Image (spheres, grey):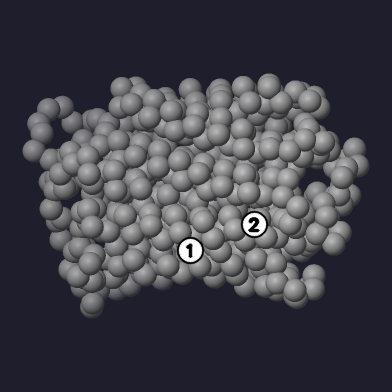
Amino acid sequence: MQASLPQMPSRLPLKTKLFYGIGDMATASVVGVIGYLINPFLLNVAGLTPAMVGIILLIKQIWDAINDPFMGTLSDRTQHRFGRRKVWIMAATIPLGLLFFASWMVPDFGQWGLFAYYLVVSILLDTFYTMHNVPYAALTAEMTDDYSERSRINIFRFGFSLIGSLVATIIFALLTDGAADQQAAYFQAAWIVMIIIFITGFAPVPFSPERNPEIDKNAPRPSITENFMSSMQVRPFRHVFLLFLCSWSAVTIVQSYIVLYLQYWVRPEGEGNLVLLVVYLQLSAVAFVIFYGWLSTKIGKKAVYFIGGGIWAAVFASVFFIQPGQEGIILVLAVLGGGGTAVALLVPYSMLPDVIDYDELENGVRREGVFYGFFAFVNKVARGLALALLSFILGWAGFQEATNGVAAATQDPAVLLTLRIFVSFLPATIVIISFFIAAQYEITEDVHQDILKKLGRTAESGSIAEIDMAG
C-alpha cells in the first residue's frame, strides 16, 4: 500500500507544457522516419529480402516483450535527485541519436552480414528508445491530476510529436528522392536528424514536475508477469490497451507500406511522392490534434474517437479505389487521414492517466511506469509483429527486392494488389473493430472527479458519479 500522494496542480504553466511537448520530437523523429522508410531502405537500398526484414522485426519484438514492461517497472522503483523518470530520459538521449544514425549505414558486410548488423542495431535502438519514451510518457500522469489538463498536455505532446516526425521525414525524403548515391543520401539525412534528437531529447528535464515518492525497499516487488496480469484485471485498462493496439496497428501498417504503394502503384515513374504526402498528412494531424483535444474537453474523449475514427475508416477504404496517376486524390485523402492519426495518438494517451488514477483507487498504488511500459510494448508489438507478418506475405506475393542497390522498376500484379489491400481495407477493418472496444470505456469526466475525491486529491464538491469497481 502506498501513502496518499500530494495533489498536483490542476493547471500547468505554458513553459512546462511547451518543453514537455518538445521532448517527444526526439522519439517521434525515430518512429516517423523508421515507420515510413525502413522497409524501402532495407529492401531497396540495403538489398535484404522481405523474409530477412520480417525476421529482424520478429526477433526485435521478442526483446520488446521484455524491455518495455521492465523499463516501466524500473522507473517506478527508481529514486534519484533528478527524479525517477527524468534520470532515464537524460541517460537515453545520446545513445538514441547515435543508434538512429547507425540504422541508416550500409557497411560492406554482404547480405547476411547486413542482416546481422541491422538486427543488432535495431535491438539496441529499441532499448534506448524505450529508456527515453516510457519514463517520458509516464510524466503525463504525474504532472497534473486534472482530467482536461491532461488532454491539453497531450495536445502539446502530440503536436510536437507530429512536427518532429514531419521534419525528420522531410529531411530524409528531400535528400534521398532521386539521389544518385542512395547510401550517401541516407547517411547525410541520418546525421542531421541525429542532431535534432540530441537537442530535443533533453527538453522536458528542467521544466516537468513529477512525483518522486519514497520507495519502501522492504515492500513486495511484483514480477513483470504479475504486473501484467494485475494490470489486465483493471477493466478500463483492458479497454484502452486494446483500443491503442487497434488504432496504432492501423497507423503502423499504412505508414510502413505507403511509400511502396506510391512507388509501384500510384506513380511508378515519378519522384518526390513522399514529401507532399507527409506534409499534408502531418500538418493535418497537428491541426486535428488541437481541434480534437479541444473537442474532447467539451464532449468527452470517447465521443471524439468515434467521430475521428469514423472518418478515418472511410478514408482508408477509399484508398483502394485510387488509380495510377491520381496523386491529387491521394493528397486530399491524406488531409482527411491526418485526423485519424490525431485520434490514434491523442485519445488513448489521454485516457490512460485516468485509468492510472482508477487503478490507484482500486489497488492502493500508483503504477505509471508499469502502465506506460505496457502501452509502449503494445505500440512496438503492433508495429513489429504486424510488419513481420505482412513482410512475409509480401514476399509470398512475389516482391522483387533491390539488386546491387538498385530497386526493381516494377512489381507483379499480385504484389500491387497486396500493397493496395495493406493501405486500405486492412486498416479500415481494424479501425471498425476498435469501435466495439471504445464503446465499453467508462471513465467520463464526472467519474474521474469522483475517483480524485475518493483519493483525497481534489477539494471540489458536488454530485458524485457512481463507478463499478468490480473490474
The residue that appears at 73% across and 69% down in the rendered structure is 115
Q: Residues within 10 Å of mark 1 (few under 14, many from 20)?
A: many
Closer-to-camera residue (325/372)? 325
Give the quarter of the figure containing the N terminus.
bottom left
Q: Of the two numbered discs 1 and 2 on the same chain, state the one appearing first in sequence.
A: 1
Amino acid found under the numbered disc labelled 2: Tyr
Residue 302, above or below 381: above
Classify residue 112 as left or right of residue 186. Answer: right
Residue 36 in the image: x percent, y percent? 63, 46
Q: In screen coordinates, is 212 left or right of 312?
A: left
Q: Is residue 67 visible?
A: no
* Secondary structure beneath label 2: helix
406 with respect to 145 (left or right): right
Picture mark count? 2
The residue that mark 1 highlights is 97
Residue at the image position 48 percent from the left and 22 percent from the top: 307
Which element is circle 1 on?
A: helix
Residue type marked 1: Gly
Confirm whether residue 125 shows in the render.
yes
Q: Residue at x 51, y 55 (%)?
A: 193
Which residue is denoted by mark 2 in the rendering? Answer: 186
| Picture coordinates of residue 349, whole percent (x, y) | 40, 43
* Residue at 24% over, 30% down: 446
Residue sticking out furthest to the right: 412
Q: Using the image as rendered, state which of residue 158 and residue 430 is in the foreground.
A: 158
